[in-house]
Amino acid sequence: MRLEGKTAIVTGAASGFGAGIARKFAAEGAQVMVVDMNHDGAMGVAGDLDHGAFGHVCNVGDAAQVKETVETALRIMGGVDILVNNAGVTHLPKPMETVDEDEFDRVFAVNCKSIYLFAKELAPAMKTRGSGVIVNVASTAAVSPRPNLSWYNASKGWVNTATKAMAVELAPMGVRVNALNPVAGETPLLKSFMGEDTPEVRAKFLATIPLGRFSTPEDLGNAACFLASDEASMITGVCMEVDGGRVI
């Protein structure tokens, strides 16, 4: 029960890595707000969790909705100890100049602007309280970019840099900020990363991962739980690869 008595917001938590993080946090004693655009998915995941978990619908790239989400979290949970910025999207693999502006804006709104919006709403309270943990989910694409995912790669590079900048600024106030860099996993985004999901494409992708498998929701849940727990009280500004050796 490493997170017993803690409260947490996990975005993009209706499926994939976010659901794995939410489940691990609840199993370790935290009350979790399961945030996602997918109403049924968010409510379904929350319904499976203990410790007063609840679902909430939010477009994390929209300032008004993020503000309302944080207000709801504060009203129900009384405060937010942990924020996990997990929500993410990508564009399909294609040459950089063929990604249209709407696709580009969506990727940066969900992957980058959302972190700014949640920090805007939550950082002041964490600073005043003198404690808090933020975990941002980036990607190995930020460290070792894949061809034809240029703007997705760039957005995740932004996440890693933002994580370090946030960590330096918030450390004197007792707030820690770290990131996770997973390799692709069995999530709804897998097909988008690969372009197509066939045994041949999977085999080619897996050949780039020394441990020979994709990241799982459980892998991300375990890593996020460690970074959010008091066991990691001396760790901030770290971008931890959870990638089976992909970027070695």
Image (cartoon, rainbow, N blue to C red):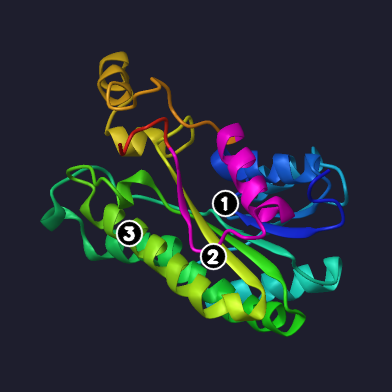
Residue 232 inside the magenta-drawn segment = yes
Q: Secondary structure at mark 1?
A: loop
Tag 1: amino acid? Gly
Identify the residue position indicated by label 2 in the image: 60
Disc 2/disc 3 C-alpha distance (Å): 19 Å
Identify the residue position indicated by label 3 in the image: 157
CB under 8 Å between callouts 2 and 1?
A: yes
Q: Which residues are magenta?
A: 218-242
For marks 2 and 3 on the same chain, the one whose residue lies earlier in the sequence = 2
For marks 2 and 1 on the same chain, the one whose residue lies earlier in the sequence = 1
User: 89 or 236: nearer the eye?
Assistant: 236
Identify the residue position indicated by label 1 in the image: 12
| Residue 39: image location, x then y, percent | 66, 51
For marks 1 and 3 on the same chain, the one whose residue lies earlier in the sequence = 1
Q: Residues within 10 Å of mark 2 (few under 14, many from 20)?
A: many
Tag 3: amino acid? Gly
Tag 2: amino acid? Val
Which disc is residue 105 wearing?
none
Question: If the image is split into quadrants, where does the C terminus sit?
Answer: top left
